Image: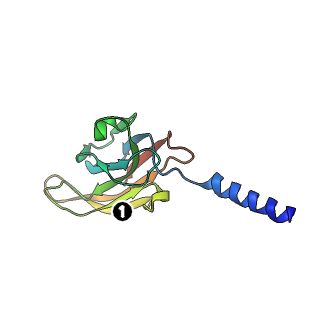
Amino acid sequence: MKKLLLSLIIMLASIAAFAQAPSAYSLVVYNQTKCTQYFMVFGDEFCVCGSTYASAVIAIPPSATFTYPNSVPLFGGTPKGIVGAKILDGTPGCTPNGGAVGQGTCGLPPSYGFINISGSCTPCAQTKATWYPAAQSCQETAKLVFTP
């Protein structure tokens, strides 16, 4: 009985060790492509999977890095949890298509591949958006990286 209980405790501890936080406190976005990338960030209360709050469409120019120390510049008000991002294939005026990336705990995929559509509504380049989640705690930083 003691061995069974010990095995159960070890199993639960290992699951907790590999558990991912449902949201992040801050976000860093890297655009490592030659195209402007368009996205929206969404989230909910701290450590809650959801999309109660959403940013406006954000355009990040080629080779730029945007740092959001908390969600206030994205959602306004007081800081909230950052859960993921809606990736737009191009400017909202050119294409409504896109995908989502985000915290795996919330059922979101870690990456989305697409052909970026430029501001003139022509293909720019094959692009991959990858979300690197807040891993251990809802107080950590997530990263969104656009690569060719």
Is residue 41 toward the left or the right of residue 136 in the image? left
The residue type indicated by label 1 comes to Gly
Residue that appears at 33% across and 39% down: 64
Q: Residue furthest front?
A: 1
Residue 121 image offset from top left, x and y in percent: 15, 58
Q: Is residue 148 above or below residue 75?
A: below
Q: Residue furthest right?
A: 2
Residue position for label 1: 113
Residue 95 image offset from top left, x and y in percent: 18, 61
What secondary structure is marked by label 1?
strand
Residue 40 image offset from top left, x and y in percent: 28, 50
Snapshot quadrant of residue 112: bottom left
Q: Is residue 55 above or below residue 5?
A: above
Q: How many marks?
A: 1
User: Callout 1 environment at 10 Å: few (<14), some (14 to 19), or many (20+)?
Assistant: some
Is residue 11 toward the left or the right of residue 28 in the image? right
Q: Is residue 33 visible?
A: no
Residue that appears at 45% across and 58% down: 106
Is residue 93 toward the left or the right of residue 130 in the image? left
Q: Nearer the viewer, residue 73 or 95?
A: 73
Q: Nearer the viewer, residue 74 or 8?
A: 8
Q: Quadrant of the N terminus?
A: bottom right
Q: Nearer the viewer, residue 65 or 20?
A: 20
Residue 26 image offset from top left, x and y in percent: 42, 39
Q: Quadrant of the C terminus?
A: bottom left
Q: Is residue 41 visible?
A: yes
Snapshot quadrant of residue 89: bottom left
